[in-house]
């Protein structure tokens, strides 16, 4: 009689956006410069070009993903 062997297949752990360990935003938004420091220091909410409101907690690094709506609005402002 042969001994059947069993193996355990590891399933990769799936991390949803709600489970991310860091607080890095999905997108960075365009915000008025004078509001950034005030928000970072005092915790006040800022309003991005796309209308989203949030407190500034992270600074975007070069190459960071930018909100498509903010980008479109910003490009429209620069042409005028």
Image (cartoon, rainbow, N blue to C red):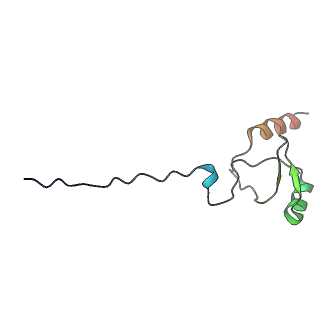
Outermost residue toward the bottom in this view: 41
x then y, percent, for residue 33: 89, 54
Left or right of 13 on screen, residue 3: left
Question: Which residue is nearer to you in this view: 65 or 38?
Answer: 38
Outermost residue toward the front in this view: 1
Numbered-mark total: 0
Q: Residue at x 92, y 56 (%)?
A: 34
Q: Residue at x 87, y 38 (%)?
A: 78
Left or right of 5 on screen, residue 40: right
Eyeballing the image, is 39 above or below 31? below
x then y, percent, for residue 45: 87, 54
x then y, percent, for residue 27: 71, 47
Left or right of 7 on screen, residue 42: right
Q: Residue at x 82, y 44 (%)?
A: 52
Question: Which residue is nearer to you in this view: 60 or 43?
Answer: 43
Question: Which residue is nearer to you in this view: 78 or 8?
Answer: 8
The quadrant the C terminus occupies is top right
Eyeballing the image, is 46 above or below 41? above
Left or right of 55 on screen, residue 20: left
x then y, percent, for residue 75: 82, 36
Q: Residue at x 44, y 52 (%)?
A: 12
Quarter occupied by residue 67:
top right
């Amino acid at each position: 009689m042969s001994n059947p062997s069993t193996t355990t297949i590891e399933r990769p752990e799936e991390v949803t956006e709600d489970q991310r360990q860091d607080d890095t935003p999905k997108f960075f938004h365009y915000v008025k410069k004078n509001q950034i420091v005030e928000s970072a220091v005092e915790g006040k909410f800022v309003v991005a070009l796309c209308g989203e409101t949030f407190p500034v907690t992270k600074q975007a690094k070069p190459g960071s993903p930018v909100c498509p709506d903010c980008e479109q609005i910003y490009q429209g402002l620069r042409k005028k």
